Amino acid sequence: MKLSIIAAVAALAATSPVAAANLITNGNFETGTLSGWTLADSGSGSWFVIGNGAGTAISGFPTPTLAAGGSFVAMTDQSNPGSHNLSQTLTLGAGAFVLSFAARGVDQSGSGGAADQQYIVTVDGTTVAGAILNSAWSDFSFNLNLAAGSHTIAFQENDRRGYYTGGLDNVSLTAAVPEAATWAMMVVGFGLVGVAARRRSATVAA
């Protein structure tokens, strides 16, 4: 028993856990569309899927290439004030999750990121990131503890001046996976429970 537990621990320590499945639909926009997403706009502009490194859809503002972005990314653009909300609602079991994505936000109006120009990320209406204001692509990751039920993840760009562009790609929501060392400790724990149970059984039989 002890040798088998040690062997299992060694095997787990030497390997990484299998990557958890992404629960977001079309999170990398490689369909070339916004399929799987719910879009709500007011005012000028919208979210668009553009070529990675291409100009924005309406104004043609240059955008940097996202190295891990594939062929397409999502980007907002408008010529006048507007508000653009891109979201997905998922039904989940209770547990720990990891939300990650790449994003950029650029105030093209020259106002320096005023309070009335914001790009934020919300989960069930609570802000987890924002205001995003970085001309280069940046990676974001957040740990979430969610109850069982329906949850909405939203990327909201609100521009009351015009010419703010928000970018998004590689959106992922996965169940948190324990580290290999945590799995190893679990195996040890189960093994010790088994040993204790057998000892109790042997004592009763005697």
Image (cartoon, rainbow, N blue to C red):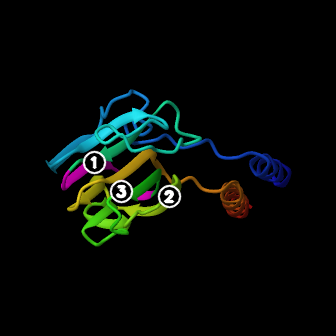
User: Quadrant of the rendered structure where residue 56 is?
Assistant: top left
Q: Say which quadrant the C terminus sits in.
A: bottom right
Q: Give the amino acid at mark 1.
A: Ser
Labels 3 and 2: the sequence-earlier one: 3
185 relative position to 61: left or right:
right
Which residues lie in the magenta part?
Answer: 80-96
Q: Which mark is residue 87?
A: 1
Lateral position of residue 25 relative to residue 116, left or right: right
Dot 2 corresponds to which residue?
Answer: 140
Q: Residue at x 40, y 48 (%)?
A: 167
User: Residue 11 vs residue 204: left or right?
Assistant: right
Disc 3 is placed on an element classified as loop
Q: How packed is label 2: few (under 14 Cα within 10 Å), some, or many (20 or more)? A: few
**Are discs 1 and 3 less than 8 Å apart at CB?**
no
Helix, strand or loop at disc 2? strand
Q: Secondary structure at mark 1?
A: strand
- Between discs 2 and 1, the one toward the N terminus: 1
Total numbered circles: 3
Are discs 3 and 2 less than 8 Å apart at CB?
A: no
**Amino acid tagged 2:** Phe
Q: CA distance from mark 2 to mark 1?
A: 17 Å
* Spatial separation of the CA atoms under disc 3 and disc 2: 22 Å
**Image coords of residue 10 (percent x, y):** 82, 50
132 over 61 or under it: above or below = below
Q: Amino acid at mark 3?
A: Gln
Q: Residue furthest right?
A: 3
- Tell which circle, 1 or 3, labels the residue nearer the N-terminal end: 1
Say the numbered circle drawn on residue 108.
Answer: 3
